[in-house]
Image (tube, rainbow, N blue to C red):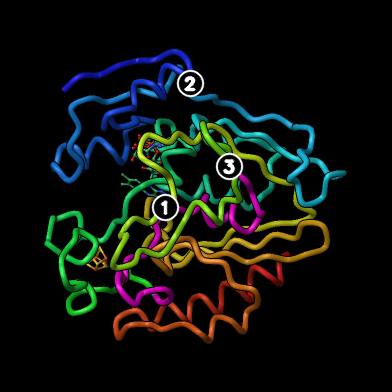
Amino acid sequence: MQLVRPSSVEEAVAALRGGAVALGGGTDLVPLLRDRIVEAETLVELHAAVPRGVRRCTPTSTSPSPSSARFWIGAGTPLAVLEAEPEIPTTLREACRLAASPQLRAMGTIGGNLLQATRCWYWRLKFPCWLHGGETCDAKEGQHREHAIFGNERCASAHPSDPAAALLALGARIRTDRRDLPLAELYRLPTDDDRSMTTLEPGELILELELPAAESSIYVKAMDRQRWAFALVGVAAARVGGETRIALAGVAPVPWLVSSPEELEQATPLPGTAYKLEIARALVQRALAQL
Ligand SMILES: Cc1cc2nc3c(=O)[nH]c(=O)nc-3n(C[C@H](O)[C@H](O)[C@H](O)COP(=O)(O)OP(=O)(O)OC[C@H]3O[C@@H](n4cnc5c(N)ncnc54)[C@H](O)[C@@H]3O)c2cc1C
Ligand code: SF4
């Protein structure tokens, strides 16, 4: 396997042509390469190519409220930097602080976090399940305690990213090497014809994020233990420009926006995930009360 280390976005994009794979901090990708779930002849290390850091920025023409303060975050910024950044909205800071372990947050970048693969063990153990191109969802018929309560018609996996829920609640936008889009449009529910969970094209790089300064925001997370665990349910709530938005982690194959607490009642839990709906109701109530 070849490792290339471009020093600019242009070099990285050129190196990614022809099936090479982008390497952020490697905390998700390296185990997938080790287990041969991802195959790559060339890895393109993004460290010196993709921007990192946080700063207040000038609103863009696509900003929902052009007069309000906004933040720019480089996609190569480690979660450990974001969890210690006092100015960014609380929901994002908390979502980063409550993710993974200190070592993983020191290595893992926000861009890689948004694109991490499912934690479904059937998928990670290479069962020929629906998401791997097979016919059935093994989790639905087998063990699915950690799985989805929304959007689970085909694949019942639960999106593992806490920061993605926070950024969705904030109405963040991302910029790639070829377009600018709301974070909500980065994700898609997989279909029989296209089983990918994001709208990224092959070789497309996330370069930066832009998000508003919320009037108030929060992230609350239910876990099997209090540290170093994926969300059973994570709830991000943010008030921006007088509007309150709620987004959930750990409940659907992609980060999940709900327009009101009542919308939780449209969940389609599996026998083993009905308890998640109870947790989601309680956490949404708690988040809105604290907001
Ligand atoms: C034990 C463990 C516990 C964890 N717990 C949590 C948790 O509780 N909450 C949570 O949110 N996360 C958790 N994580 C996930 C962790 O936060 C992510 O693995 C990490 O953030 C990924 O970032 P990375 O830079 O290491 O990505 P990589 O592993 O380098 O890459 C991940 C994917 O993103 C692609 N990629 C990376 N950067 C870019 C870019 N800029 N543009 C385009 N593609 C890119 C890669 O090609 C790859 O497909 C956990 C991980 C582990 C191993
Ligand atoms: S939940 Fe998705 S990834 Fe897991 S077994 Fe079902 S189809 Fe595969």
- Furthest residue toward right: 67
Q: Which residue is denoted by mark 2 in the rendering?
A: 9
Judging depth in this view, the residue of 7 and 267 nearest the camera is: 7
**On the image, numbered disc 1 is attached to which residue?**
198
Which mark is first along the chain, 3 or 2? 2
- For mark 1, give the secondary structure: loop
Residue 37 pos. (x, y %): 17, 46
Ligand 1 quadrant in view: top left
Please provide percent x and percent y for residue 204.
Answer: 43, 36
Q: Is residue 5 magenta?
A: no
Residue 270's spot in the image, x, y percent?
Answer: 32, 83
**Residue at (54%, 24%) from the top-left corner?**
51
Q: For mark 3, give the secondary structure.
A: strand
Nearer-the-camera pick, 56 or 233: 56
In the image, what residue occupies the spot 64% across and 49% down?
A: 172
Q: Quadrant of residue 136?
A: bottom left
Q: Quadrant of the N terminus?
A: top left
Please say if the residues under marks 2 and 3 sit with CB atoms less than 8 Å apart.
no
* Range of magenta residues: 149-173
Residue 288 is left or right of residue 257, and the answer is right
Residue 151 falls left or right of residue 83: left
Counting residues from the start of the chain, the first of labels 2 and 1 encountered is 2
From the image, tell me which residue sits under label 3.
174
Q: Amino acid at mark 2?
A: Val
Residue 278 visible in the shown view:
yes
Observer-nearest of 213 and 218: 213
